[in-house]
C-alpha cells in the first residue's frame, strides 16, 4: 500500500490558453493600469497646456517610483516599458511618407543626411570626451539627429542592455525634450535675425529641432510655407530612423547574442514604412494607428518613469544633460554653415 507521503497530493496547475491568459492578466494588470493612468493624465495636461506629453509622463511617473518593487505592479510596469515600447516604435513606420519630402530637392536632402551622420559621430566623440560610453553617445546623438524622444527609445531598444541603463534612456528623453522645447521658442527668432526667408527658415527648423511636434509648432509660427517645409524636412530625418537602427543593430550584433538579424520591431517598422508608401491605406486607419503609436510610447515612458527615481537619474551628474546640449548646438552650427553655403 502506498503511503500518503508517496502520493502527490498537490493540485496540478491549470493549463490551457484561458487559465494562462487569466494568470498573465492577474500578474500584469496593476502595473498596466498604473502606466496607462499616468499616460492619460499626461496626455490631458499636454492638450491643455501645450507641453510635451512625454515630459509630463516622465515627471508624473517618477512620482510613483515607490511602487516599482511592489509585486502588484512590477510585472506590468516591465511589460509596458519593454513590449509596449517596441510595439509603439514599430507602428511609427505608418507615419512616414516620402512624397512630400521629395519636394525639397536633392541638395537639402543631402544636407539633412550629412548633418545626421555628423551628429551621430559627434555624439559618440563628445560622449567619450565626457567619459561616457559609445552606446550612450549613439543614444544622445541619435535622439538629437533624428526625432527626439521617439528616436531615443527606438535606439535604446536596439542597444544591448549591458551598455545602457534605463536611467540613461530617461535622462536622454528629459534632456532632448527640454532642448527641443527651448529650440521651438528660440530658433524661429534666431533664423529671422540671420535674414532667412520663409523657405530657408522652414528648412532650418525641420533640420535642427528634435521632436516632430516642436518642429510643427515652430515652423507654423513663422508662416504656412515655413511650416510645410519644416514638416517635410523633419519627416526626412524620421525616415532615416530605420537605417540608423539597422547600423546600430549590426554594430552590436555580437553583444545582442551573436545574431545579425534585426529585432522584430525594427523589421515591422521597415515593413509598415514600405506599406505606407506603396499601398493606399484609409486615412482613418492611418490616423488611428498614429494616435495608437503615440499613446503607446507615452505609456512606455510613463512606465520607465515609474521605474526610475530622481536620485538614480542624476547619479552620474549633469554631464549627460550637458552632452545633449552640446549635441544640439553642434547640429545647429552645421545647419547654419550649410544654409550660408547652399541656401543664401
Image (cartoon, rainbow, N blue to C red):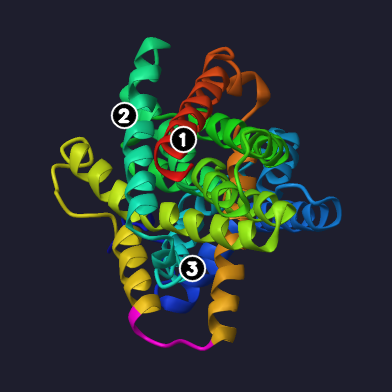
Q: What residue is shown with label 3? A: 95
Q: Nearer the viewer, mark 3 or mark 1?
A: 1
The answer to whether residue 190 is visible is: yes
Mark 1 or 2, nearer chain start: 2
Q: Quadrant of the N terminus?
A: bottom left
Q: What is the crowding at mark 2: few (fewer than 14 residues within 10 Å), some, or many (at least 20)?
A: some
- Which residue: 44% across, 31% down? 337
- Tell me: residue 61, above or below residue 130: below
Residue 82 drawn at (x, y percent):
46, 50
Measure the C-alpha gap from mark 3 to mark 1: 32 Å
Q: Please tell me which residue lies in front, 19 or 173.
A: 173
Q: What residue is shown with label 1? A: 340
Image side of residue 202 versus residue 100, left or right? right
- Tell me: residue 104, above or below residue 184: below
Q: Quadrant of residue 157?
A: top left
Mark 3 or 2, nearer chain start: 3
Residue 317 drawn at (x, y percent):
57, 12
Q: Which residues are magenta?
A: 278-282
Q: What residue is shown with label 2? A: 121
- Tell me: residue 139, above or below residue 39: above
The outermost residue toward the right is: 48
The answer to whether residue 68 is visible is: no
Secondary structure, mark 1, is helix
Secondary structure, mark 2, is helix
Amino acid at each position: 500500500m502506498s503511503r500518503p507521503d508517496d502520493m502527490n497530493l498537490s493540485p496540478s496547475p491549470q493549463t490551457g490558453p484561458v487559465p494562462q491568459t487569466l494568470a498573465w492578466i492577474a500578474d500584469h494588470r496593476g502595473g498596466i493600469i498604473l502606466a496607462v493612468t499616468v499616460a492619460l493624465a499626461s496626455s490631458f495636461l499636454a492638450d491643455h497646456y501645450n507641453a510635451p506629453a512625454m515630459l509630463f509622463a516622465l515627471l508624473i511617473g517618477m512620482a510613483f517610483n515607490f511602487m516599482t518593487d511592489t509585486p502588484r505592479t512590477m510585472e506590468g510596469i516591465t511589460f509596458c516599458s519593454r513590449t509596449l515600447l517596441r510595439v509603439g516604435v514599430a507602428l511609427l513606420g505608418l507615419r512616414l511618407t516620402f512624397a512630400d519630402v521629395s519636394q525639397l530637392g536633392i541638395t537639402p536632402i543631402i544636407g539633412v543626411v550629412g548633418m545626421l551622420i555628423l551628429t551621430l559621430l559627434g555624439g559618440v566623440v563628445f560622449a567619450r570626451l565626457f567619459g561616457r560610453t559609445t552606446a550612450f553617445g549613439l543614444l544622445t546623438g541619435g535622439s538629437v539627429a533624428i526625432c527626439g524622444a521617439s528616436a531615443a527609445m527606438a535606439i535604446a531598444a536596439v542597444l544591448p542592455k549591458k551598455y545602457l541603463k534605463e536611467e540613461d534612456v530617461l535622462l536622454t528623453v528629459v534632456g532632448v525634450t527640454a532642448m527641443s522645447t527651448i529650440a521651438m521658442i528660440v530658433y524661429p527668432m534666431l533664423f529671422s535675425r540671420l535674414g532667412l526667408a520663409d523657405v530657408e527658415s522652414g528648412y532650418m527648423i525641420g533640420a535642427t529641432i528634435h521632436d516632430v511636434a516642436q518642429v510643427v509648432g515652430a515652423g507654423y509660427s513663422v508662416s504656412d510655407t515655413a511650416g510645410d517645409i519644416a514638416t517635410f524636412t523633419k519627416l526626412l530625418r524620421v525616415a532615416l530612423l530605420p537605417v540608423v537602427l539597422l547600423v546600430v543593430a549590426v554594430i552590436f550584433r555580437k553583444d545582442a547574442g551573436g545574431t545579425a538579424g534585426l529585432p522584430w520591431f525594427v523589421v515591422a517598422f521597415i515593413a509598415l514604412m514600405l506599406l505606407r508608401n506603396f499601398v493606399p491605406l484609409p486615412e482613418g486607419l492611418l490616423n488611428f494607428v498614429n494616435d495608437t503609436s503615440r499613446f503607446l510610447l507615452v505609456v512606455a515612458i510613463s512606465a520607465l518613469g515609474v521605474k526610475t527615481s530622481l536620485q538614480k537619474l542624476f547619479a552620474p551628474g549633469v554631464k549627460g544633460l550637458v552632452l545633449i546640449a552640446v549635441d544640439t548646438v553642434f547640429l545647429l552650427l552645421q545647419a547654419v554653415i550649410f544654409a550660408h553655403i547652399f541656401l543664401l
